[in-house]
Amino acid sequence: MGVTSAWRYVRGVSRAVRRGDTFPAAGRIAPADAPGGTTRRVVRHGPAELDQIEISEHVVPVPGLSAPVEVLHLTDLHLRTRDERLDRLATLVAAERPDLVAITGDVVTRGWANDAVDRLLSAVPEAPLGRWAVMGNWEYWGGAPPEVWEPILKRNGIELLNERVERVGPLALVGTDDLLAGSPDVEGLLARLDGTPALLLTHSPGIFPRLARAPVRVVLAGHTHGGQIRLPLLGPFFLPRGSGAYPWGWYQLDGVWMFVGRGIGWSVAPFRWRCLPEIARIRLVPG
């Protein structure tokens, strides 16, 4: 790494720490499994954690759900340029066979390239209940606001679920704008629900207390990267603003469950430690 790159990373870490919480208490609590159980396996392409992917599988009983739904959850890819790692990731994603795909923001970051985005998004598998995405803060900050991002998603067969409610199979599917960079209208969205069990997609988990009410049953989020760098006993070095008390894993509030994925990419520096990238399979079952 050259002097210029090293300085850029130091400056980025300093800026990130100022915007987030350093060694937050919530990060020292062991992440919880899904209410119906969680299993994990790791696909390794090299010794570095960024060259590994954990495939986590979760089961969630959902009251009032009439049929099971398999959800593929992707978040925080932070795509930049096309490389070998991206091609391997695209191959893994393409092999999935979900009923529904949920992409909870930060697909891109500053300096992203169209060919990298199209390579990944074109690999997202067909799903009978649709392929859906919500906005993350880096879509806004990286030059892909909704009017730019929606056509990119559409050319790859993915719908932008920003501030929308859709009925998909046995679920109501809800998508919020990003808490940090957007303008989520939580009250307006929830007022449009009719009692059908709802799966809600959002980017920043700090909004969870505003979302935790019936008929929302499950919330999927990202944003935190699980801390990206997790130290023994101390937990994550820092969590970004908008994380709230939700570093990664499962959380329950007023009968609503939220899953915070660790994401796939990196922010500030190309490094993860004790915090593998993650692709999540979430099986919603009648409860």
Image (spheres, rainbow, N blue to C red):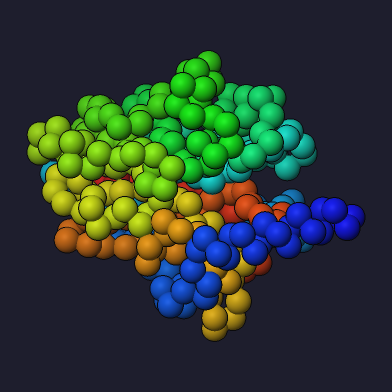
Which residue lies at the image location 46% right of the left edge and 58% below the top edge? 241
Q: Is residue 94 visible?
A: no
User: Residue 66 location, x and y as percent?
Assistant: 17, 38
**Position of the N terminus by quadrant:** bottom right
Circle count = 0
Q: In this view of the protein, which residue sits in the foreground, 126 or 192?
A: 192
Q: In this view of the protein, which residue sits in the foreground, 230 or 129?
A: 230
User: Residue 263 location, x and y as percent?
Assistant: 54, 51
Which residue lies at the image location 23% right of the left edge and 42% below the top edge? 186
Q: In the picture, residue 72 is in which quadrant?
A: top left
User: Residue 47 location, x and y as percent?
Assistant: 77, 61
Q: In the picture, residue 182 is in which quadrant?
A: top left
Q: In this view of the protein, which residue sits in the foreground, 169 or 175?
A: 175
Decide: is 56 above or below 170: below
User: Residue 173 location, x and y as percent?
Assistant: 27, 34
Q: In this view of the protein, which residue sits in the foreground, 74 or 280?
A: 74
Which residue lies at the image location 41% right of the left edge and 24% below the top edge? 159
Q: Name the outermost residue toward the left.
A: 195
Direction from residue 181 to residue 271 in the image, left or right: right
Which residue lies at the image location 50% right of the left edge and 36% below the top edge? 140
